[in-house]
Amino acid sequence: MTPAHGEVHRSGRIGWLRASVLGANDGLISTSSLVVGVAAAEPSPGAVLVAAVAGLVAGALSMAAGEYVSVSSQADTEGADVTRERAELATSPEAERAELAAIYRSRGLSEDLARQVADQLMSHDALGAHARDELGIHELTRARPIQAALASAASFAVGAAPPALLVALLPPEKLTPAVVGATVVLLLILGAVAASLGGAPRLRGAVRVAFWGAVAMVCTAAVGRLFGAVV
């Protein structure tokens, strides 16, 4: 949402950006690594395809469940804090007013001005003022479990789709180099986009994501080759 004064801040993207980037990276890296590892063991093409699709489905559901539980815990904590603050406002409004004024004094306001600001905000929305300035709960960054779960599941599925499609379309002898090459390119793009949205250097973000994705594929390929040889 664009603020009324016309400026756009990246902090409003933190929640969904974190979940989406994590899901897409995880989907692409884990599914590509799974495909490369299973292919290195030299099973049938059908087995590689089943592994890719199963990895996509299981990973998307796992990401959704994990994100929902994690963010729900955060939402429960925020709700408990707000409930406690509401009770304190009902029983000790003057103490809460003094507490709010003390917060503003600590931020550089004079004694008189801090009291005036506290009075104005308490008369307008006392609970909102304390939630924001005492508890640090803001509308843009508050926990939204369902939104986070859906974003994680969808982004994981999007990230996992390219390697799964390559398994379905390519012959076995071309699969591993195609998956590795496509994954590295996509990770570079995804890392650069994520860094750009977050205001970080694009090259650093792209290389960082691609490097760890390559490490994951090399390790799983080694495991697949080892266990394939043993079998």
Image (spheres, rainbow, N blue to C red):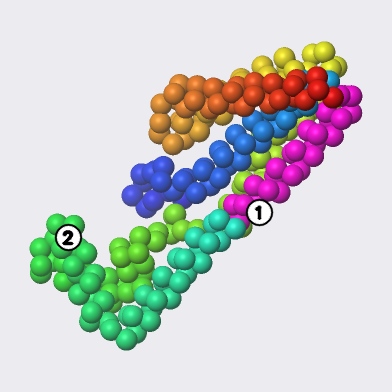
Provide residue 161's location: percent of width, then percent of height: 73, 33
Q: Residue at x 85, y 17 (%)?
A: 171
User: How many numbered markers are drawn?
Assistant: 2
The CA distance from mark 2 to mark 1 is 41 Å
Please, what is the three-letter code of the amino acid marked with disc 1? Ala
Question: Which numbered marker is on residue 165?
Answer: none
Q: How many other residues sit within 10 Å of disc 1, few (<14), some (14-19) or many (≥20)?
A: some
Q: Is residue 105 left or right of residue 10?
A: left
- Which corner quadrant holds the C terminus? top right
Provide residue 115's location: percent of width, then percent of height: 16, 71
- Residue 220 appears in which quarter of the rendering? top right
Q: Is residue 197 left or right of residue 225?
A: left
Question: Which numbered marker is on residue 106?
Answer: 2
Is residue 50 in the magenta section? yes
Region rendered in magenta: 43-68
Question: Which numbered marker is on residue 65?
Answer: 1
Depth check: 208 or 3 in front? 208
Depth check: 95 or 47 in front? 47
Q: Which label lies toward us, 2 or 1?
A: 1
Q: Residue at x 66, y 36 (%)?
A: 27
Depth check: 148 or 56 in front? 56
Provide residue 202's location: percent of width, then percent of height: 45, 25
